[in-house]
Image (spheres, rainbow, N blue to C red):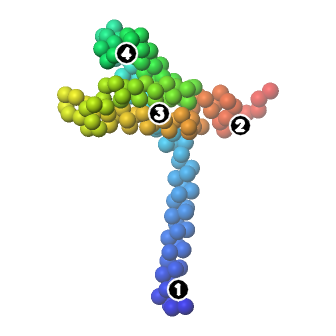
């Protein structure tokens, strides 16, 4: 074997081992990533829902009715954003709450933002932001809230050293 090739192969093996260690380290941080996803999506949805529920619930229902839907889904969407956001923040019923939020955002994209394009304009926002939030919700449907969530603790997870009787 050529000496340069030998050292080249050896260097590749060393880099792949180092990269493998980095990947294993990052794998251990997945619970933190799920926590960040939950906190970001929960804060966004709770804020949007709060402003709709406490700042103009009736106006939101009229806006929804103006989109060709009945008015009652406006109430449902406002409370879905508020309560779903709070549940996602706490990591309690994370998957059902994320599903409801994802459906809510899909309808918002379809009925409100889609015709403005991905980016939109300053006075007519596009669907890039609700699409990003829907992607977070979609991921939480399948990944769950992770080990740093009430769901995990109430299912008997966690690392407590006490014995249950």
The residue singled out by tag 1 in the image is: 6
Question: Considering depth in this image, is 1 or 106 the residue closer to the camera?
Answer: 106
In the rendered image, residue 20, in percent from the top left (x then y), is placed at 55, 63
Q: Element under label 3?
A: helix
Pair 1/2: label in front: 1
* Residue contact between numbered discs 2 and 3, judged by CB atoms under 8 Å: no
Q: Which mark is residue 105?
A: none
- Graded by Cα atoms within 10 Å as few (under 14), some (14 to 19) or many (20 or more), the crowding at tag 2 reads few
Tell me which label, 4 or 1, sits earlier in the chain: 1
Identified at 37% across, 35% down, the residue is 131
Q: How far is the residue under mark 2 from the one under mark 4?
A: 53 Å
Q: Which mark is residue 137?
A: 3
In screen coordinates, is 17 left or right of 114?
right
Q: Which mark is residue 161?
A: 2
In screen coordinates, is 111 left or right of 83?
left
Question: Considering depth in this image, is 106 or 48 the residue closer to the camera?
Answer: 106
* Residue contact between numbered discs 4 and 1, judged by CB atoms under 8 Å: no
Tell me which label, 2 or 3, sits earlier in the chain: 3
């Amino acid at each position: 074997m050529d000496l340069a090739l030998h050292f080249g192969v050896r260097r590749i093996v060393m880099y792949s081992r180092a990269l493998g260690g980095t990947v294993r380290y990052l794998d251990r941080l997945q619970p933190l990533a799920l926590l960040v996803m939950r906190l970001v999506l929960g804060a966004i949805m709770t804020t949007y829902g709060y402003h709709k529920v406490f700042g103009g619930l009736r106006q939101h229902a009229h806006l929804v009715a103006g989109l060709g839907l009945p008015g009652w889904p406006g109430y449902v969407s406002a409370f879905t954003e508020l309560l779903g956001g709070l549940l996602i923040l706490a990591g309690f019923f994370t998957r059902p709450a994320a599903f409801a939020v994802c459906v809510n955002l899909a309808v918002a994209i379809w009925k409100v933002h889609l015709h403005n394009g991905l980016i939109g304009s300053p006075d007519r926002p596009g669907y890039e932001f609700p699409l990003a939030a829907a992607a977070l919700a979609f991921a939480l449907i399948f990944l769950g809230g992770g080990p740093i969530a009430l769901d995990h603790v109430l299912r008997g997870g966690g690392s407590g050293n006490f014995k249950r009787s």
